[in-house]
């Protein structure tokens, strides 16, 4: 092999290793960020949008029921 071929082979090897290394680094950072995100979600006890909307509807129904009960009580109190 000539010197130029050795040089090209060495350069291509270095480039290939650096590409693999950069992909590994990118994957590692991505994994770390996902883990951190999940950790924060658990720490702050966040819920999904669907869970929030279901809970919101339940609370609204309870408020309506309480208003009906309080109206009935106020009508009975007025009759007495």
Image: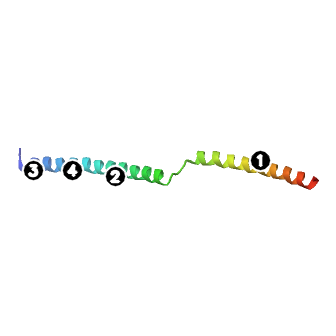
Q: Is residue 5 left or right of residue 72?
A: left
Q: CA distance from mark 2 to mark 4?
A: 21 Å
Q: Nearer the viewer, mark 1 or mark 2?
A: 1
Q: Is residue 75 left or right of residue 9?
A: right
Q: Nearer the viewer, mark 2 or mark 4?
A: 2
Q: CA distance from mark 1 to mark 2?
A: 50 Å
Q: How many marks?
A: 4
Residue 29: x %, y % from top left: 34, 52
- Which of the two labelled residues, at mark 1 and mark 2, occupies the earlier sequence position? 2
**What secondary structure is marked by label 4?**
helix
Q: Which of 66 and 6 lies nearest the eye of the viewer?
A: 66
Q: Which of 56 and 6 lies nearest the eye of the viewer?
A: 56
Say which quadrant the N terminus sits in.
top left
- Which of the two labelled residues, at mark 4 and mark 3, occupies the earlier sequence position? 3
Q: Residue at x 9, y 50 (%)?
A: 4
Q: CA distance from mark 4 to mark 3?
A: 16 Å
Mark 2, residue position: 29
Mark 3, residue position: 4
Q: Residue at x 36, y 48 (%)?
A: 31
Residue 69: x %, y % from top left: 81, 49
Mark 2 and mark 4 in contact? Answer it, CB < 8 Å: no
- Which of the two labelled residues, at mark 1 and mark 3, occupies the earlier sequence position? 3
Mark 4, residue position: 15
- Which of the two labelled residues, at mark 3 and mark 2, occupies the earlier sequence position? 3
Q: Residue at x 72, y 48 (%)?
A: 62
**What secondary structure is marked by label 2?**
helix
- Which of the two labelled residues, at mark 2 and mark 4, occupies the earlier sequence position? 4
Residue 20: x %, y % from top left: 25, 47
């Amino acid at each position: 092999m000539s010197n130029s071929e050795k040089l090209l082979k060495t350069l291509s090897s270095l480039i290939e290793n650096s590409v693999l290394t950069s992909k590994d680094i990118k994957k590692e950072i991505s994994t770390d960020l996902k883990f951190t995100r999940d950790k924060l979600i658990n720490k702050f006890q966040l819920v999904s949008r669907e869970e929030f909307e279901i809970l919101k509807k339940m609370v609204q129904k309870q408020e309506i029921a309480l208003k009906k009960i309080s109206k009935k009580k106020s009508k009975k109190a007025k009759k007495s």
